[in-house]
Image (cartoon, rainbow, N blue to C red):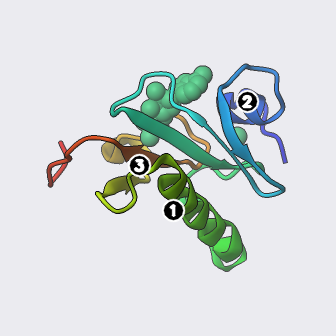
Amino acid sequence: MEQQDCLFCKIVAGEIPSTKVYEDDVCIAFNDIAPQAPTHILVIPRDHVRSMNETDEKHKETLGHLLLTAAELARKAGFAEKGYRVVINTNEEGGQTVFHLHVHLLGGRQFIFPPG
Ligand code: AMP
Ligand code: ZN
């Protein structure tokens, strides 16, 4: 269900352009507008979910689907064996700025831990 004034709902609806790299019935994946790595893709559910805090039992399949999609996109991008990072920022202290659940897939460079 689309949420008024949600940037990523507008991307799902095609009202705001994005560089789509994958889509299916459950999710879409597109390039981040401010990439933090050579490959930086956002995988988002078509249905609006504000953050991890709003997930429950009924989101099990969607959450699994987002992660499996990220893994598949990492394999397709060719950096799966070398390694990559998957990130879900949650609320203000978690660094979330867009309040429509999204999985960051970052690859193509060395990452350090813990992140900032
Ligand atoms: P987060 O800080 O985890 O909420 O991540 C939001 C991400 O969305 C950031 O990495 C932004 O660069 C990215 N972003 C914001 N607007 C757009 C857009 N119009 N198209 C693609 N990515 C975007
Ligand atoms: Zn939304």
Question: In front here: 84 or 34?
Answer: 84
Between tags 2 and 1, which lies in front?
1
Please name the amino acid that badge 3 sits on. Asn
Question: In front here: 106 or 60?
Answer: 106
Please say if 27 is above or below 36.
below
> Which residue does the numbered mark 2 point to in the structure image?
11
The location of residue 56, given as percent across then percent down, is 63, 74
Residue drawn at x 34%, y 54% is 85
Q: Is residue 108 left or right of residue 90?
A: left
The location of residue 64, given as percent across then percent down, is 61, 72
The answer to whether the beta carbon of the residue marked 3 is less than 8 Å from any atom of ligand 1 is yes
> Which residue does the numbered mark 1 point to in the structure image?
71
Residue drawn at x 38%, y 52% is 79
The answer to whether the beta carbon of the residue marked 2 is less than 8 Å from any atom of ligand 1 is yes
> Which secondary structure lies at badge 3?
loop
Say the numbered circle drawn on residue 89: 3
Q: Counting residues from the N terminus, which is met first, the one under dot 2 or under dot 1?
A: 2
